Amino acid sequence: MKYFLALIAAATFIGCDYADKTPAGNGSSHVIPKEAFDSSKFTTIEWIDSTSKDYGKINEGQKLDVSFRFKNTGDKPLIIRSVKPGCGCTAAEPPKEPIAPGAEGTIKASFNSEGRPGKNSKDIYVDANTKGTQSHTVHFDVEVVKK
């Protein structure tokens, strides 16, 4: 019995050591300043176009670039801490630099339609140093026409 427990413990330590160590954001080197977590430095955001878009129809296999514009409406730099697509068919990255007060920025993403015929409804989760809530969701719809 003690050998069995030792084997389980060893497997656990080895498994933890080999865990995925890639940085967040699809392997990008996005460094989050510590100010992004200080609530006294939170700001406000306004989504310029809309947080929901319909891109109509595209052909299967086509890549669709999507974007969501926003403005820092506060008086502190806006820091997008993370941008996480709801599934693996969409890749997105946060802006690399903080957005100055009064300035605009863009969340850019790319949807791969290969193997996804029919209606597709996709969410992208944005985490930022914003007052009230730090979690924002942008959404897009697209219909993929089968080859």
Image: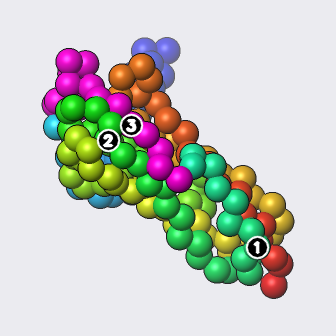
Q: CA distance from mark 1 to mark 2?
A: 32 Å
| Residue 126 percent across, percent down from the top left | 45, 41
Quarter where residue 101 is shown: top left
Q: Residues within 10 Å of mark 3 (few under 14, many from 20)?
A: many
53 on left or right of 66:
right
Residue segment shown in magenta:
34-49
Q: Secondary structure beneath disc 2? A: strand
Q: Residue, x 63% and y 49% (percent of image)?
A: 52
Mark closer to the chain start, 1 or 2: 1
75 on left or right of 4:
left
Q: CA distance from mark 2 to mark 3?
A: 5 Å
Amino acid of disc 2: Asn
Residue closest to the far top: 1
| Residue 45 percent across, percent down from the top left | 39, 37
Q: Secondary structure beneath disc 3? A: strand
Front: mark 1 or 2: 2
Q: Are marks 2 and 3 in contact (CB under 8 Å)?
A: yes
Q: Is residue 92 visible?
A: no
Amino acid of disc 3: Ile
Q: Which mark is residue 45?
A: 3
Q: For this rendering, which residue is in front, 7 or 88?
A: 88
Q: Which residue is mark 2?
A: 72
Mark closer to the chain start, 1 or 3: 3
Q: Is residue 2 visible?
A: yes
Q: Which mark is residue 9?
A: none
Q: Which residue is mark 1?
A: 57
Amino acid of disc 1: Lys
Residue 2 vs 118, above or below: the answer is above
